[in-house]
Image (spheres, rainbow, N blue to C red):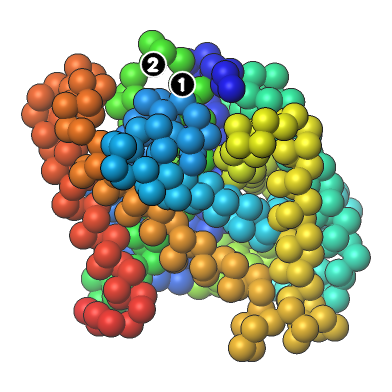
Amino acid sequence: MKIAQFSRTGFIMAAAGSAVGLGNIWKFPYMTGEYGGGAFVLVYLITIFFVGFSVMVAEMLIGALGRRDTVGSFERLAPPDKKGWKYAGFMGFNGLIIMTFYSIVIGWIFYYLFKLLETLPDSTDAAKKTFDNLVTNEAGIQIFWHTVATLIVTYIVYRGIKRGIEKINLILMPALMVILFGMLVYAFNLEGFSKAFSFMFEPDWSRLDSEAIVRAIGHSFFTLSLGMGAIMTYAASLPKNASITKTALIVTLMDTLIALVAGLVIYTFLFQEGSPPTQGPGLVFISLPVVLSNLGYLGTFLALLFFLALSFAGLTSAISLVEPVVQYFIDKFDTTRLKAVFTAGLLYYIVGIGALLSYTNRWGEVFSIGGKPLFDILEYTTDSILLPVGGLLIAIFAGYILQKERVRAALEHEMGKTFFNLWYFSIRYVAPIALVFMMLNLMGVLKI
Ligand code: PFF
């Protein structure tokens, strides 16, 4: 099966569109708040550049050399006696698991976009009520918006690499950047900006515990879309003349920059009004609208822009979460894109309903396991287990299974000798050690 090719800019925007998502604008700011600010940001930045970037290069390399769906690429590249590596390609299915809750959050964002047009809540209590009510009581409304999100995402994927994925990323990514950087310029002139800046960039080491480190490593994978074959699947459509190293660097930088800008914008607004930074997942759904309501019409306008940017970020990542499985179905069963998208969409859509019901008062118990809501289980499993395992497999494959000469031939002319050796060292030792350390820590075997 011949896979369509992106244009060079199209590929950069699609990969950046995958990386820049809810992880940057929703999750990163609230995690920074929960884990104490600057020190967390520093660990995050270090892992992004020393581990994440190397794994991204490896993931792109496997896709660009394999030129198939994830299972096909691993199978094709593995030496004859190691064909079992094809099973690593099933990491593509992680995307559907992520989609079960990702789609729900995109649905919340859509709901907020409409809700904000009416009024912004003027107190934290009111805002909390709106959010809690949506999540715990309004199953019907959530299912409606989850359906809308699913239809949009699957339609774009159905349109394919060129006419769907590339096209939408070329529109939404620049729009997202214009909105966020515009908001940054506005925030820069507010008093809260300097506080936000110190909160994010002055590390307070006493706040950094092992949990914060582990979460920072996990998040660096999530935010770069690594460990589940999204970047690999896109890279199978990498134009032949594109540089893997350069593209991976641009995507990593864009992703990091946008997370930092989103954090600065949100914390400027929050500190401007004296709100505390530690508000968890409700940060952008509860605190931000309240803070902005003090600004009258301007606040409504800013809130709309913000949620619009958030929805763009979510959609462009969501399509990259669905595409790997779709590509797999097409390659494996020689089926049409329509059928492949329908099947993949239906799978995550149904489990997603279970996930959203798991937060409701009425159905919560039915959709919980061991007292934990399905939503949390799915999120925790992917973020903290499946993506790091996927990342580890990618690192091992690129560092130990692929012949070094082949890897060198593909990358050294782009990177130069020294940088190639550094990268190879990182993919063989630094990335696996960081990932194993993180997993052991998670399992509670090793306590720092
Ligand atoms: N990188 C996306 C975000 O930060 O929201 C989430 C994501 C997309 C994770 C695609 C993994 C993936 F393959």
* Direction top: furthest residue: 241
- Mark 1 element type: loop
Task: Classify 229 as above or below 125.
Answer: above
Residue 124 image offset from top left, x and y in percent: 70, 73
Task: Classify 60 as above or below 82.
Answer: above
Q: Is mark 1 within 8 Å of ligand 1?
A: no
* Image point (30%, 67%), residue name: 438
* Image point (39%, 66%), residue name: 215
Query: Do the residues bearing badges 2 and 1 touch, measured as CB atoms within 8 Å?
Result: yes
Residue nearest the observer in this picture, 36 or 51: 51
Task: Classify 441 as above or below 178.
Answer: below
Q: What's the distance in space between the residues labelled 2 and 1, CA to CA?
A: 7 Å
* Image point (85%, 76%), residue name: 137
**Circle 1 is placed at which residue position?**
238
**Circle 2 is placed at which residue position?**
242
Residue 139 in view here: yes
Residue nearest the observer in this picture, 300 or 143: 143
Task: Classify 41 as above or below 73.
Answer: below
Left/right of residue 286 with respect to residue 50 in the rendered view: right
Left/right of residue 177 with respect to residue 219 in the rendered view: right
Residue nearest the observer in this picture, 105 or 291: 105
Q: Quadrant of the C terminus?
A: bottom left
Q: Give the amino acid at mark 1.
A: Leu
Residue 303 image offset from top left, x and y in percent: 71, 49
